[in-house]
Image (cartoon, rainbow, N blue to C red):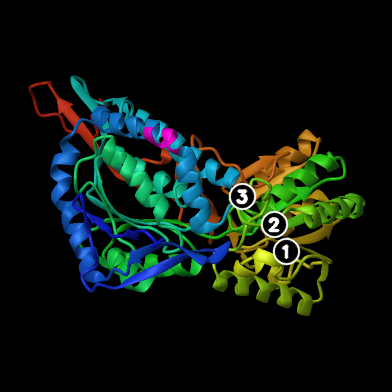
Amino acid sequence: MSATVYKNFIGGESIASRAGKTFERRNPADTREVVGVFQESDAEDVDAAVRAAKAAFPAWSGVPAPQRGEILLRAAEIIQSRKDRYSRDLTREMGKPLFEAGGDIVEAIGMAQYAGSEGRRMHGVTTPSELPNKFQMSIRQPIGVVGLITPWNFPMAIAAWKMLPALVCGNTVVIKPGEDAAISTYNLVECLVEAGLPPGVVNIITGHGPGAGQPLVEHPDVPVISFTGSTATGRLVYELAARQLKRVSLELGGKNPLIVMPDADIDLVMQGVVWAAFGTTGQRCTATSRLIVHREVAGPLVARIIARARSLRVGNGLDAETEMGPLVNATQLERVLGYIELGQQEGATLGCGGGRLRDGDLAHGHFMQPTVFTGVRPTMRIAREEIFGPVLSVIEVDSLDEAVAVANDVAYGLSASIYTRDINAAFRAMLGLQSGIVYINAPTIGAEIHLPFGGVKATGNGHREAGPTMLDVFSEWKSVYIDYSGSLQRAQIDNIA
């Protein structure tokens, strides 16, 4: 059976790339299967999508925000009705097990509900004037065409996190999904269209970064760019967009620490570490990649983690018994294996894993063993650089202060965690960790959509996704003053007698 061909979605129509070029996406769990054929878009395709979005903007921005929100709420119901099918699509295109894929879909549903409800809130503020017979308030207004560049690891959730707040604010969208997992974006937009989204309000272009992503970033009619990906690419996006003074939101890398104090519940820690280090095959920006553990409990805790890691069922995510799927592609697999070799060269001890899995059907996919390094020093590259794979580095410390210092001594600051029953230690860590997200007695993954998501330092540029701040990237503040005194009143003049 031939694979489905996905064309660009521009102005409500499916359109092939102008150059006629396409590329295949193969199932990372079984590369014999082509899951889809996509357009290799270029600057001409991007321009067509932007023109469609620009043409749709006046009418869409004029739709009352509650009505825009109602479309999102209807879309949430449609996504829910197709959750099982969309989960299978997601697993086939990027590899994560079905139970995780279902969580990805649920996040999109939640964001549709949350962003849709903002159509009836979208709060501004009113404040008292310093002058009599004068009223003042602030309101939000849409900006225009928003360019979204999304990754492959949460292909529906992150697309929803960006797209739906932009839409409820009244913007139109051009999205370039990650080339390894674009089907989920088509599924999301399919639901929005069925819910009543007008043509041209959302447009999809597929392709690779240099050919499709860069022209979107540089297009003069796209005043807002929201990007999730590597820190190296994020810096390039920021640089290119800055030349035109664009608004840019960056969600980049992480090197997330999980701190364990001697009084922690060791069984609870083990469960949390294994889930956070090896869930999504470690391909999360919030994955726990550093276990910073007090020496008093390091031995028994690490032994339990290694035993559980060895027992994890690795395989095709469509198998209900699979606990960890493949890496997303061959390049990522080789990158992770390269870091494992580097860790051994640096002097770390390979506690378990470290190799590629080739038994039976696994030979047709990008599978590797869950890996734990012990004896890791904070100065090692495996303890400082984002690996984005199922690799955990164990660092032993002698105190809470040392643990926090080690946790902070990296370029990133997305998510951090501490396990302790000592409320004083918990609060000291909560305030001292240089991180946009802090968990107490829970691992570094699991952010919820109704709180801000994002990090500090090289993890981003200060913006936050989700939560009450999610509209800030996609809207302009306007301050409005109404003077009904009937006379000239001069603000910011010394009026005090």
- Residue at 76%, 55% in the rendered image: 291
What amino acid type should be assigned to the residue bearing mark 2? Val
Q: In which quarter of the image is the N terminus?
A: bottom left
Q: Residue 250 got which mark? A: none
- Marks counted in the figure total 3
Q: Quadrant of the C terminus?
A: top left
Q: Characterize the local packing of mark 3: few (<14), some (14-19) or many (20 or more) Cα atoms within 10 angstroms.
A: many
Q: What percent of the width, then of the height, locates residue 199? A: 19, 45
Out of 21 and 109, give the one closest to the viewer: 21
What amino acid type should be assigned to the residue bearing mark 3? Ser
Q: Is residue 422 above or below residue 254?
A: above
Answer with the quarter of the image where residue 405 lies: bottom right
- Magenta span: 78-82
Q: Residue 314 got which mark? A: 2
Q: Is 163 on the left-hand or right-hand side of 413?
A: left
Residue where numbered disc 1 is placed: 369
Distance Cα–Cα, label 2 vs label 3: 26 Å
Find out whether the residues at labels 1 and 2 contact each other: C-beta distance under 8 Å: yes
Q: What percent of the width, then of the height, locates residue 71? A: 29, 32
- Tell me which label, 2 or 3, sits earlier in the chain: 2
Q: Is 13 on the left-hand or right-hand side of 191?
A: left
Q: Residue 415 got which mark? A: 3
